[in-house]
Amino acid sequence: MVTRRSTLEPLGSLPDDQRRLLLDIGPRWGHDILGHRQTVIQCYTPLVAAAPRDGIVVERDVRYGPHERHTLDTFLPAARHAESGRRTDDGKLDAVVFVHGGAFVRGNKSVNGEIYDNVCYWFASQGLAAINVEYRLADAAPYPEGAQDVADALAYVHRHAARLNIDPDRVFVIGHSAGGAHAATCLFDPAVTDKTPPPPVAGLVLISARLVADTRPGNPNAKPVRAYFGDDETRYHERSPLTHIARSTVPLMIAVAEFENPYLDEYGVQFFLEALRHRGVPPRLIQLRGHNHTSIVAHFNSGEEYLGREILHFIGNVGNPAVAV
């Protein structure tokens, strides 16, 4: 039997032995990212699998483009959840579009039938429509094609907003890790926006996102970065989302874990500072104490809700002229 605890304590939904294990791994996270990632997934999978899902309607592997990875899953809230969420006067729902990570060269919208699905299940349980996006990987789609896939998925959501009962003016993008890079590139980088402008979005949440293309010696994902952004490092600056922050005024929230893949926390803070410099008002910036690069998303729908509640607060305040977001 899985015990789920509702808590704001970092990693607090986990059994005590697993919580201690992840806190012990934390400072050593970058030494074995793939191995530690698997440990996190093993810890959280039973918890999120046990979360109630009554009435949430899931449609899987919906095609939004011609490639086999051009698919998405939709999670629509049950009527009682929809009543609790923010809705327009005509009953339309806010929506979140989640873009998973995977260092540009791996990853799926559902790791094992639970992880990454858990993010969308949690938002649907809060009364929002949630969409989980698959995209092409670096071998088939180097820069900027991953971002173009995000733009195409957003276009699909807008085209089908009426069927999904979504307010097209209230679509928010959440990108994790490489998915955050794709989301930011999609919205900020002229390589995408000047070619096929994506539909407008109401806000962007970047979670542990790779916002700078780099192959620094301490970056354990330097080879995947090169696989996606190319061998010509002189072009990395122009291909980094950080370079283009001034080109967009989309409301922005940034979250990083205490124990990150090397440099991702640094780049998140840089993105925050650049946004502040160009916009004059700070975007929202959060560091999740005790969490690592994987648990920062794997914990959704486990009973720990701090980050989720902060994102809902961000979403709720977009469009409120009295609140800077």
Image (spheres, rainbow, N blue to C red):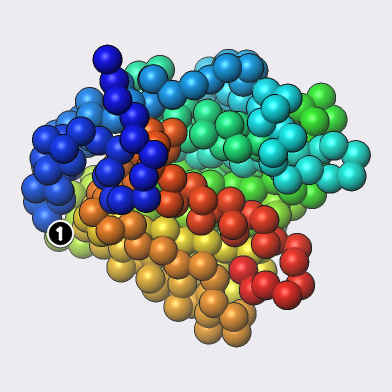
Residue at (79% x, 49% y) in the render: 169
Q: Which quadrant of the figure contains the C terminus?
A: bottom right
Q: Quadrant of residue 63?
A: top right
Residue at (45% x, 29% y) in the render: 118
Seen from the viewer's position, the closer of residues 17 and 66 is 17
On the question of residue 212 being in view, the answer is no
Residue 250 percent across, percent down from the top left:
66, 63
Seen from the viewer's position, the closer of residues 248 and 48 is 48
Q: Residue furthest right?
A: 90
Residue at (52% x, 28% y) in the render: 121
Can you identify the residue that label 1 sits on?
218
Q: Quadrant of residue 258?
A: bottom left
Residue at (37% x, 50% y) in the render: 8
Q: Which quadrant of the figure contains the N terminus?
A: top left
**In the visual, does 89 lie left or right of 256?**
right
**In the visual, does 211 lie left or right of 165?**
left
Residue 56 percent across, percent down from the top left:
62, 20
Q: Quadrant of residue 58?
A: top right
Q: Residues within 10 Å of mark 1 (few under 14, many from 20)?
A: few
On the question of residue 85 being in view, the answer is yes
Seen from the viewer's position, the closer of residues 135 and 280 is 280
Residue 282 percent across, percent down from the top left:
54, 77
Circle 1 SS class: loop
Residue 198 percent across, percent down from the top left:
70, 48
Give the amino acid at mark 1: Gly
